[in-house]
Amino acid sequence: EVQLVESGGGLVQPGGSLRLSCAASGFTFSSYWMHWVRQAPGKGLVWVSRIYSDGSSASYADSVKGRFTISRDNAKNTLYLQMNSLRAEDTAVYYCARGVLRGWGYDYWGQGTLVTVSS
Amino acid sequence: QSVLTQPPSVSAAPGQKVTISCSGSSSNIGNNYVSWYRQLPGTAPKLLIYDNNKRPSGIPDRFSGSKSGTSATLGITGLQTGDEADYYCGTWDSSLSAYVFGTGTKVTVL
Protein backbone atom coordinates (compact mmCIF):
# COMPACT_ATOMS: atom_id res chain seq x y z
CA GLU A 1 0.00 0.00 0.00
CA VAL A 2 1.35 3.38 -1.01
CA GLN A 3 1.78 5.72 1.95
CA LEU A 4 3.07 9.26 2.24
CA VAL A 5 3.41 10.64 5.76
CA GLU A 6 4.39 14.27 6.31
CA SER A 7 5.90 15.64 9.50
CA GLY A 8 7.70 18.70 10.75
CA GLY A 9 4.94 21.27 10.68
CA GLY A 10 4.23 23.64 13.53
CA LEU A 11 4.20 27.22 14.72
CA VAL A 12 7.13 29.41 13.68
CA GLN A 13 7.79 33.13 13.88
CA PRO A 14 8.08 35.28 10.77
CA GLY A 15 11.61 35.04 9.40
CA GLY A 16 12.10 31.61 10.93
CA SER A 17 12.84 28.25 9.38
CA LEU A 18 11.25 24.83 9.31
CA ARG A 19 12.03 21.55 7.60
CA LEU A 20 9.23 19.30 6.46
CA SER A 21 9.70 15.59 5.82
CA CYS A 22 7.61 13.13 3.84
CA ALA A 23 8.24 9.45 4.52
CA ALA A 24 7.28 7.24 1.58
CA SER A 25 6.49 3.54 1.61
CA GLY A 26 4.79 0.88 -0.50
CA PHE A 27 6.42 1.82 -3.80
CA THR A 28 9.82 2.33 -5.45
CA PHE A 29 10.40 5.88 -4.24
CA SER A 30 13.45 6.44 -6.44
CA SER A 31 11.37 6.00 -9.61
CA TYR A 32 8.99 8.90 -9.07
CA TRP A 33 9.03 12.66 -9.29
CA MET A 34 7.80 14.11 -6.02
CA HIS A 35 6.05 17.40 -5.28
CA TRP A 36 4.97 19.70 -2.49
CA VAL A 37 1.56 21.37 -2.69
CA ARG A 38 0.12 23.72 -0.09
CA GLN A 39 -3.31 24.97 0.86
CA ALA A 40 -3.89 28.04 2.98
CA PRO A 41 -6.87 27.83 5.38
CA GLY A 42 -10.09 28.01 3.41
CA LYS A 43 -8.24 28.50 0.12
CA GLY A 44 -7.36 26.45 -2.95
CA LEU A 45 -4.43 24.26 -3.86
CA VAL A 46 -1.10 25.84 -4.78
CA TRP A 47 1.88 23.97 -6.20
CA VAL A 48 5.11 24.70 -4.34
CA SER A 49 7.93 22.59 -5.73
CA ARG A 50 8.96 19.52 -7.71
CA ILE A 51 12.02 17.29 -7.74
CA TYR A 52 13.09 14.68 -10.28
CA SER A 53 13.26 11.03 -9.29
CA ASP A 54 17.05 11.09 -8.98
CA GLY A 55 17.14 14.52 -7.37
CA SER A 56 19.03 16.01 -10.29
CA SER A 57 16.61 18.87 -10.91
CA ALA A 58 14.09 20.91 -8.94
CA SER A 59 11.52 23.58 -9.74
CA TYR A 60 9.79 26.14 -7.52
CA ALA A 61 6.83 28.45 -7.53
CA ASP A 62 7.88 32.10 -7.79
CA SER A 63 6.40 32.78 -4.36
CA VAL A 64 8.93 30.49 -2.64
CA LYS A 65 11.92 30.67 -4.98
CA GLY A 66 15.10 31.50 -3.10
CA ARG A 67 13.52 30.71 0.28
CA PHE A 68 12.49 27.04 -0.01
CA THR A 69 14.62 24.07 -1.02
CA ILE A 70 13.28 20.67 -2.00
CA SER A 71 15.46 17.59 -1.65
CA ARG A 72 15.19 13.84 -1.32
CA ASP A 73 17.06 10.89 0.11
CA ASN A 74 16.24 7.86 -2.01
CA ALA A 75 18.09 5.58 0.38
CA LYS A 76 15.74 6.68 3.17
CA ASN A 77 12.64 6.98 0.96
CA THR A 78 12.14 10.49 2.24
CA LEU A 79 11.29 13.82 0.65
CA TYR A 80 12.16 17.13 2.32
CA LEU A 81 11.21 20.78 2.11
CA GLN A 82 13.53 23.25 3.82
CA MET A 83 11.66 26.49 4.39
CA ASN A 84 13.59 29.64 5.31
CA SER A 85 12.60 33.28 5.75
CA LEU A 86 9.04 32.24 6.44
CA ARG A 87 6.25 34.75 6.01
CA ALA A 88 2.69 34.91 7.28
CA GLU A 89 1.46 34.09 3.78
CA ASP A 90 3.29 30.75 3.94
CA THR A 91 0.77 29.58 6.54
CA ALA A 92 -0.88 26.50 5.04
CA VAL A 93 -1.28 22.77 5.12
CA TYR A 94 1.62 21.31 3.17
CA TYR A 95 1.05 18.09 1.24
CA CYS A 96 3.63 15.89 -0.40
CA ALA A 97 2.35 14.21 -3.54
CA ARG A 98 3.63 11.57 -5.92
CA GLY A 99 3.70 12.34 -9.63
CA VAL A 100 1.99 9.91 -11.98
CA LEU A 101 4.58 7.66 -13.58
CA ARG A 102 4.77 8.44 -17.29
CA GLY A 103 1.87 10.84 -16.99
CA TRP A 104 0.78 14.14 -15.54
CA GLY A 105 -1.03 14.43 -12.24
CA TYR A 106 -0.56 13.48 -8.60
CA ASP A 107 -1.81 10.01 -7.81
CA TYR A 108 -1.03 9.79 -4.10
CA TRP A 109 -1.06 12.47 -1.44
CA GLY A 110 0.00 12.57 2.17
CA GLN A 111 -2.37 13.67 4.92
CA GLY A 112 -0.69 17.05 5.15
CA THR A 113 1.16 18.94 7.86
CA LEU A 114 0.13 22.39 9.08
CA VAL A 115 2.64 25.22 9.07
CA THR A 116 1.62 28.37 10.93
CA VAL A 117 3.77 31.48 10.62
CA SER A 118 2.85 33.95 13.32
CA SER A 119 4.38 36.03 16.07
CA GLN B 1 -4.94 34.28 -8.31
CA SER B 2 -5.11 31.13 -10.41
CA VAL B 3 -4.63 31.05 -14.17
CA LEU B 4 -7.23 28.29 -14.45
CA THR B 5 -10.85 29.36 -13.99
CA GLN B 6 -13.59 27.09 -12.65
CA PRO B 7 -17.17 27.89 -11.67
CA PRO B 8 -17.42 28.45 -7.90
CA SER B 9 -20.23 25.95 -7.49
CA VAL B 10 -22.46 23.48 -9.32
CA SER B 11 -25.36 21.44 -8.01
CA ALA B 12 -27.73 18.69 -9.05
CA ALA B 13 -30.06 16.11 -7.59
CA PRO B 14 -28.93 12.57 -6.70
CA GLY B 15 -28.59 10.42 -9.79
CA GLN B 16 -28.20 13.38 -12.10
CA LYS B 17 -25.12 14.58 -14.00
CA VAL B 18 -22.90 17.59 -13.42
CA THR B 19 -20.10 19.02 -15.48
CA ILE B 20 -17.32 21.25 -14.22
CA SER B 21 -15.40 23.44 -16.63
CA CYS B 22 -11.77 24.53 -16.38
CA SER B 23 -10.70 27.39 -18.60
CA GLY B 24 -7.07 28.23 -19.31
CA SER B 25 -4.80 29.29 -22.13
CA SER B 26 -2.38 27.98 -24.70
CA SER B 27 0.47 28.01 -22.19
CA ASN B 28 -1.30 25.58 -19.89
CA ILE B 29 -4.37 23.55 -20.91
CA GLY B 30 -3.84 24.18 -24.60
CA ASN B 31 -0.52 22.35 -24.69
CA ASN B 32 -0.38 20.18 -21.58
CA TYR B 33 -2.27 17.35 -19.97
CA VAL B 34 -5.04 18.10 -17.47
CA SER B 35 -5.79 16.27 -14.24
CA TRP B 36 -8.75 16.50 -11.87
CA TYR B 37 -8.90 16.09 -8.09
CA ARG B 38 -11.64 15.73 -5.49
CA GLN B 39 -11.16 17.03 -1.98
CA LEU B 40 -13.56 16.06 0.76
CA PRO B 41 -13.68 18.43 3.76
CA GLY B 42 -10.63 18.07 6.00
CA THR B 43 -8.91 15.51 3.78
CA ALA B 44 -6.19 15.41 1.17
CA PRO B 45 -7.07 15.71 -2.52
CA LYS B 46 -7.65 12.53 -4.50
CA LEU B 47 -6.83 12.03 -8.17
CA LEU B 48 -9.87 11.38 -10.35
CA ILE B 49 -8.55 11.94 -13.88
CA TYR B 50 -5.05 12.31 -15.33
CA ASP B 51 -3.72 12.90 -18.84
CA ASN B 52 -7.02 14.62 -19.77
CA ASN B 53 -9.23 11.53 -19.70
CA LYS B 54 -7.56 8.58 -17.94
CA ARG B 55 -8.95 7.18 -14.72
CA PRO B 56 -6.64 5.73 -12.06
CA SER B 57 -7.36 2.26 -10.82
CA GLY B 58 -10.35 2.29 -8.49
CA ILE B 59 -12.01 5.41 -9.87
CA PRO B 60 -15.48 4.49 -11.21
CA ASP B 61 -16.47 5.30 -14.77
CA ARG B 62 -19.04 7.78 -13.41
CA PHE B 63 -16.12 10.20 -13.64
CA SER B 64 -14.92 11.32 -17.05
CA GLY B 65 -12.59 13.97 -18.40
CA SER B 66 -12.26 15.73 -21.71
CA LYS B 67 -10.28 18.58 -23.23
CA SER B 68 -10.89 20.87 -26.16
CA GLY B 69 -8.53 23.69 -27.02
CA THR B 70 -7.81 25.69 -23.90
CA SER B 71 -10.65 24.25 -21.81
CA ALA B 72 -11.22 21.00 -19.99
CA THR B 73 -14.31 19.43 -18.48
CA LEU B 74 -14.97 16.95 -15.69
CA GLY B 75 -18.21 15.02 -15.85
CA ILE B 76 -19.83 13.18 -12.96
CA THR B 77 -22.83 10.98 -13.66
CA GLY B 78 -25.08 9.19 -11.20
CA LEU B 79 -24.43 11.88 -8.60
CA GLN B 80 -24.22 10.62 -5.01
CA THR B 81 -24.28 12.44 -1.69
CA GLY B 82 -20.71 11.26 -1.18
CA ASP B 83 -19.69 13.33 -4.22
CA GLU B 84 -20.22 16.55 -2.27
CA ALA B 85 -16.73 18.00 -2.23
CA ASP B 86 -14.42 20.56 -3.79
CA TYR B 87 -13.07 19.71 -7.24
CA TYR B 88 -9.88 21.10 -8.78
CA CYS B 89 -8.35 20.91 -12.21
CA GLY B 90 -4.60 21.13 -12.68
CA THR B 91 -1.97 21.25 -15.39
CA TRP B 92 1.55 22.39 -16.15
CA ASP B 93 1.96 25.98 -17.32
CA SER B 94 4.86 26.22 -19.75
CA SER B 95 5.14 30.01 -19.45
CA LEU B 96 5.21 30.03 -15.66
CA SER B 97 7.24 26.79 -15.46
CA ALA B 98 4.91 25.80 -12.68
CA TYR B 99 2.06 23.42 -12.06
CA VAL B 100 -1.18 25.36 -11.71
CA PHE B 101 -4.48 24.44 -10.13
CA GLY B 102 -7.92 25.76 -10.90
CA THR B 103 -9.90 28.01 -8.58
CA GLY B 104 -11.95 25.05 -7.35
CA THR B 105 -15.61 24.12 -7.67
CA LYS B 106 -17.88 23.07 -4.85
CA VAL B 107 -20.32 20.35 -5.84
CA THR B 108 -23.59 20.24 -3.92
CA VAL B 109 -26.02 17.34 -4.13
CA LEU B 110 -29.51 18.74 -3.69
Image (cartoon, coloured by chain):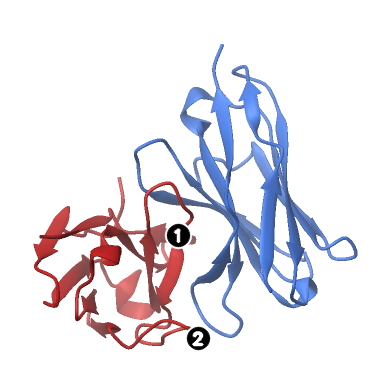
Chain colours: A blue, B red
| Residue B109 to residue A63: above or below | below
Residue B82, percent across and down?
30, 65
Q: How far apart are the alpha carbons under marks 2 and 1? A: 16 Å
Query: Which mark is first along the chain, 1 or 2?
Result: 1
Looking at the image, residue A78 sits to the left or right of residue B34; the answer is right
**Circles 2 and 1 on the same chain:** yes
| Residue B110 to residue A102: above or below | above
- As drawn, the residue found furthest toward the right would be A75
Local packing at callout 2 (Cα closer than 10 Å; few below 14, some 14-19, many 20+) is: few
Residues at discs 2 and 1 in contact (Cβ within 8 Å): no
Quadrant position of residue A28:
bottom right
> Which residue position holds label 1?
B45
- Give, as a three-letter code, the residue at label 2: Ser
- Give, as a three-letter code, the residue at label 1: Pro
Q: Look at the image and tell me in which quarter the N terminus of chain B lies.
A: top left
Q: Residue at x 50, y 23 (%)?
A: A88
Residue A68, percent across and down?
65, 41
Instruction: Describe the element under mark 1 as helix, strand or loop.
Output: loop
Q: Residue at x 41, y 87 (%)?
A: B54
Local packing at callout 1 (Cα closer than 10 Å; few below 14, some 14-19, many 20+) is: many
Residue A99, percent across and down?
59, 71
Which of the labelled discs sits on residue A46, or is there none? none
Instruction: For mark 1, name the chain.
Output: B
Q: Residue at x 88, y 60 (%)?
A: A76
Quadrant position of residue A52:
bottom right
| Residue A103 to residue B86: above or below | below
Instruction: Describe the element under mark 2 as helix, strand or loop.
Output: loop
Instruction: For mark 2, name the chain.
Output: B
> Which residue position holds label 2?
B57
Looking at the image, residue B66 sits to the left or right of residue A45; the answer is left
